[in-house]
Image: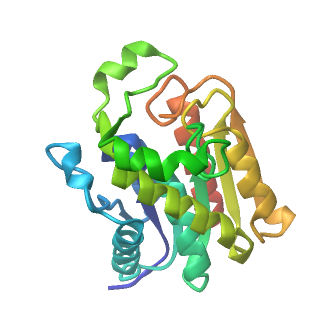
Amino acid sequence: MTKKPYGVLIVHGFTSSLDCVNGVEAPIQALGLPTRMPVLRGHGGETPEALRGVAWTDWVADAEAALQDLLTEADKAIVFGHSLGGLVALTLAADHPDVVDSIIVAAGAIQLANPLAPGRPLHFLAPLVTRLIDKVNMPPVYTDPALAQYDTNYAWAPTDAVSTLFDLIKTVRRRLPEIHVPALIMHSRKDTTVAPEASEVIYNNIGTPPDQKRLVWFEVTEHEMFRDCESDATIQTVVDYVRERAGV
């Protein structure tokens, strides 16, 4: 089998189903590019209990396995990730610069709005809260509330899963200067889950040369940017960047 020059790895978010990102798959495949869209460990279960005991290293390992599988059909990968998936994309770019051509980080979860998250004033209380509370409610958030009825994400997460997400955030933040591949960073100024400043942190701290990174803002959508009211525009932004990188 003759390999394609490029393929695309698509990585979903924390507590998310593949619905949060699958809107980009068909238009990318229509460009003639192979894709992989793994379900990260603990996701896709009957209940959020499936996330209990899962570590962030499991999520990275699942994405790496999908990357290696994609490389059986493509010489290099463009890695697209939303939220948690953005953190995974950044990790893969740092670990595998020889095969990761570029990354698309959408609402990369390096700075959460949650006051207990890393970088927030109350983060020092997070270990105590983790011991006292068994789960964290995570209701769907959309600018267009009518769309929330179609949401298929988990409605809550075990606190140990949130804790390992916090560990990943701190790890990726330290590693940002190691990333040198071209990057498209996307975010909404109205995101109340991942603070909009997160994308500025990523843009300003990755080692990618200025002429090879860009930051694109949306003004209306909430965190579920590929299912919310600006989904057509967000999906098209991803597809246009993939087309540009792949030269198709």
Using the image as rendered, state which of residue 21 and residue 87 is in the foreground: 87
Residue that protrudes farthest toward the left in the picture = 46
Q: Is residue 121 visible?
A: yes
Task: Give the residue displayed 43% in from the left and 49% down from the top.
Answer: 13
Q: x, y percentage for residue 33?
A: 44, 64
Say which quadrant the N terminus sits in: bottom left
Task: Give the residue displayed 37% in from the left and 27% down from the top.
Answer: 139
Q: x, y percentage for residue 58?
A: 34, 70
Task: Give the residue displayed 45% in from the left and 48% down from the top.
Answer: 128
Compared to 10, does 195 lie above or below?
above
Say which quadrant the C terminus sits in: bottom right
Using the image as rendered, state which of residue 163 and residue 140 is in the foreground: 163
Q: Is residue 34 visible?
A: no
Task: Give the residue displayed 66% in from the left and 72% down from the top.
Answer: 175
Q: x, y percentage for residue 247?
A: 62, 65
Judged left or right of residue 115, residue 149 is left
Choose top left, top right, bottom left or bottom right for residue 100. Answer: bottom right
Using the image as rendered, state which of residue 45 and residue 170 is in the foreground: 170
- How does the figure colour the protein chain or chains? rainbow
Judged left or right of residue 108, residue 155 is left
Residue that protrudes farthest toward the top in the picture = 146
Compared to 97, does 190 lie above or below?
above
Q: x, y percentage for residue 71?
A: 41, 80
Choose top left, top right, bottom left or bottom right for residue 67. Answer: bottom left
Labels in figure, total: 0
